[in-house]
Every structure is written in structure tokens, then in C-alpha cells.
Image (spheres, rainbow, N blue to C red):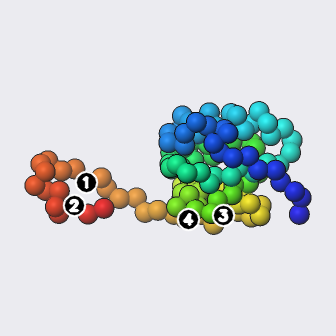
Amino acid sequence: MKHISFVGVSTLSKTCLSRDRGYEAAMALLKIIGDSQIGVDLDTDGVVSLSFLDGLMLEIAKKGALSQVAFKTKRSDVRDKLARIAGARSLAILDASMIAIPPRYVEEVEPVFVNDKSQLESVTC
């Protein structure tokens, strides 16, 4: 297997909390990727939001470079988010071993609207 250099996600973006930051991180990554393969280490002390990852994946995929990027994390919540994006967007997202993360499909649910606070007790998450 070919050696892949990894870059920390914190070097690509100040925070990992929004889709816009995900786009910015993707643009920073695309500047350094060239024709080679590169990895992104998603382990950080902060939160890595689903929106951030979605923006990151969509922009990289839009540029046709997703097959050149591997994602590494020890965090199960981040791996689950990657799997959800793979399922929702029909993307092959590669892990550190260059193996596609199995997609996870989430059933769509109807939003719950609460008219007053007394109804909150019956709403579960």
C-alpha cells in the first residue's frame, strides 16, 4: 500500500462547525493535493459537525478529488457522520486504509412542531 501523508483538520479550518467552514477546508485541501493522495486527520479536541463534514465532502467530490482523499478518526461519532454522508450523498468516502466507509442510511422523519412549552415533555429526541 502506498504511503499517505495526513494533514490535521485544524490546519485546514479554524473551526469544524459549519458547512461554510467545510467548503473552506476543502478549498485549502484542494490547493495542496495536486495529483497525489492525501489524508485528513479528523481527530480534534473540538466538535466536528455533520454540516462541516458535508460541506467538505461535497466540495471535494464536486472537484472530482474524493478518491484521492482518505479520512482518519478514532472517534465513533465522526465515523458515524461520515457513514451518514456516504449514504445520503451516495459518495465513496475512504478511510485511512483507503477502504470505503460503509454508508449508513437514515430514515427521514417528519419534523415535530411544538406550540407551547407544556408539550415539550411529550417530545423525545
What residue appears at the point 74 percent right and 60 percent down from the top-left corner?
96
What residue appears at the point 69 percent right and 57 percent down from the top-left corner?
72
**Dot in front, 1 or 4:** 4
**Dot in front, 4 or 2:** 4
Three-letter amino acid code of the residue under disc 1: Val
Three-letter amino acid code of the residue under disc 3: Ile
Evaluate if marks 1 and 3 touch, with contact meaning CB atoms under 8 Å apart: no
Q: Which residue is mark 3?
A: 101
Q: Which residue is mark 1?
A: 112
Three-letter amino acid code of the residue under disc 4: Ser
Q: Position of residue 119 (x, y in %)?
A: 13, 56
Q: Which residue is mark 2?
A: 123
Q: Nearer the viewer, residue 62 or 7?
A: 7
Q: Which residue is mark 4?
A: 76
Three-letter amino acid code of the residue under disc 2: Val
Does residue 44 sit above or below 124 in this rendering?
above
Query: Is tag 3's residue or tag 2's residue first in the polypeptide sequence?
Result: 3
Query: Is tag 4's residue or tag 3's residue first in the polypeptide sequence?
Result: 4
Q: Is residue 97 visible?
A: yes
Query: Is tag 1's residue or tag 3's residue first in the polypeptide sequence?
Result: 3
Q: CA–CA distance between discs 4 and 2?
A: 26 Å
Query: Is tag 1's residue or tag 2's residue first in the polypeptide sequence?
Result: 1
Evaluate if marks 1 and 2 touch, with contact meaning CB atoms under 8 Å apart: yes
What residue appears at the point 77 percent right and 33 percent down from the top-left corner?
31
Q: CA–CA distance between discs 1 and 2?
A: 8 Å
Q: CA–CA distance between discs 4 and 3?
A: 12 Å
